[in-house]
Structure formats: C-alpha cells, structure tokens
Amino acid sequence: MDVGIRDAMLPGLGGREFFAYVRDLGVRSLEIEVAADLTTPLIRRDDGSPYSVADEDGSISLARRLNAEGVHACALLVATDFSAPPVDDHIHWAVRAVQAAAEMGVPVVRVDPLARDRSLPGDHVRDAFVRSVARVLKHTADTGVDLGIENHGPMANEPQFLDELFAAIETPRLGLTLDTGNFYWFGHPLSDVYRIIERYAPRAKHTHVKNINYPPDLAEQRRPVGLDYGKYCCPLDEGNLDLRRVVAILRAAGYDRTLCVEDESIGKAPQETKLAVLRRDVDAVRDALAHAG
C-alpha cells in the first residue's frame, strides 16, 4: 500500500503550483477527476487548459505529464448518476474513463451510485445502477480495469444496498471505493463501522480515507444521516476512526493499493494552513501503515 491524495484536495492551494504542492506533500499517487466532458478540471496544462481523456492521444498526453512530474494516477473518478437521464451519456462517460484508465495504466475507476434526485426510491436507484454498470463492464471487458463503487450518499452506506448490487453483478472487476468516513457519516455507530469495513475490505479496489470527530456521547449512537458533518469532519489525525485499525483490516483482507487522502474539513482551514493540514493527513496515513497491527 502507498499514500495518495484526491486532486480535489489541492486546487485551493494555487492552480499552476498544483504539482509543486503534490511534491511538497511527498505523495506520488493521485486520484484524478474526469468530468462529464472527459476533461480533467483539476489537472491542467501550463496554459491553464484542462487535459482531456476523450481519446487515446489525450490519455497518453496526461500520462506523460504525470510521469514528468514524478507522480502516477491511482484511480480516475467519475461522478456518474445512472438514475438521471440521459443514462446513455453517463454510461459513455464511465466507459471512456475505463478505456482511458487502461491506456494510462490506472487500475480502477471510481463510480458513483448516488442519485441526485433524492425522491427516487431505493429499488429504482439500485436497478438503474445495476443495468448501467453491467453495460459499462460489458463494453470494457478487454481492459482489465476495475470499477470501485463508492459507499456514497444515503443508500450506498447501507450494507443491504451494497449486498444487492454485488449479488446482481458477480464479477471480480467490481468492488468498492471504500470510504472510511462515509459509513460513519451515514450514522453507523463507531464500533459498527469497523465491522462494516471488515465485511467489505475484501471488495476494496480503491479507498478514500477521511475522518470525523463526533463527541463521545454521539460516537456510539445511531445518528441521523450526515448529522452536523460540516461541524465534525476533521483532519485525519483528529477523528474517532483509528486509522491503524482500518489499515490492519484492509491489509488482512489483501488490499495492496493506494490509501487515498480525502480530508473534507480542508475547506474550514485558513488558506495559510491548508498545506500544513494536508501534510498532517499524509503523515497520519503513513503512521497507520507503519504501525498497523
């Protein structure tokens, strides 16, 4: 396992200096967002224009830039919504991202099960996701690239929902972008979060490592979804989740890919301290790697 970071953690630190900040953090792995138009909004050329992975030439150009900067992509991220029309556009988006990942040597693409229309029933969201992901997998069968469903939003942090997805699509290419904080955000008590992570660790294809610092009287309660998240989300070294324990669970399950920092509290940090906070996040993950049981 190595330490990486989402590109979304860095843009507030200064556009043209993006890779300088990555080097300052000492990480060599990046999760890269791919927008619906197949551009990379946060990874840009020196002239400020985004890269595009709409074709193989674009993918190779991006890979060359990353190599020149001494980093690589651990995952591509697409914010799909397979419940929203036109569904074919979202399928094409995911398919092309998987093809680009293969061209760049990236092992996994994060896909999103979240439905932006919160009025849709769970079975509709589940069935639409299953149909669409089956098509994505079929159209990318020759790539060898995995899909990592993030446990994201008010449905995909429920074990029953995840189990139904995996039961409907049985392939070793489909697994989780296992987000350590989202299960806790959803309202699962802290002790249950570890059990859920252990349950799904064998499915992990990619990770988002985040933390939340609920007060003791809330940590072991079943809480409303997202309770005061903006207040309690925090740097990785300040939260209730024991990262050493999380890493030990992932390691025991055979996970050997990137631990990807996603500190959503960074927006609360004063500008002049953001980089220092991210350094602490990276150090917290390195400590967990060094001392996990």
Image: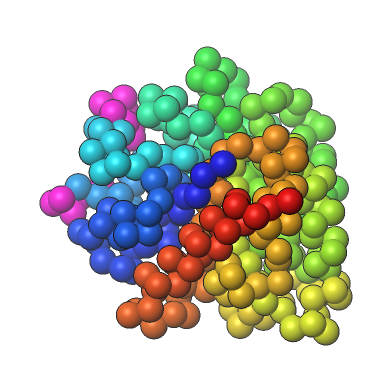
- Quarter in which the N terminus is drawn: top right
User: 141 or 107: which is nearer to us?
Assistant: 107
Horizontal relation, residue 57 to residue 208: left or right: left
The quarter holding residue 118 reads: bottom right
Q: Where is residue 5 in the image (x, y as percent from the top left)?
A: 46, 53
Identify whether 42 is placed above or below 74: below
Taking the magenta stretch, the answer to whether it contains residue 159 is no
Identify whether 129 is placed above or below 186: above
State whether residue 201 appears in this view. yes
The quarter holding residue 59 reads: top left
Q: Position of residue 220 (x, y in %)?
A: 85, 74
User: What's the residue at 71%, 72% (across, down)?
Assistant: 240
**Among all residues in the image, which is located at the extreme left?**
47
User: What's the residue at 34%, 55% (across, down)?
Assistant: 22
Identify whether 132 is placed above or below 247: above
**Count of numbered circles in the view:** 0
Taking the magenta stretch, the answer to whether it contains residue 55 is yes
User: What's the residue at 68%, 52% (across, down)?
Assistant: 292
User: What's the residue at 83%, 68% (across, down)?
Assistant: 189
User: 276 or 30: which is nearer to us?
Assistant: 276
Q: What stretch is highlighted in magenta?
A: 46-60
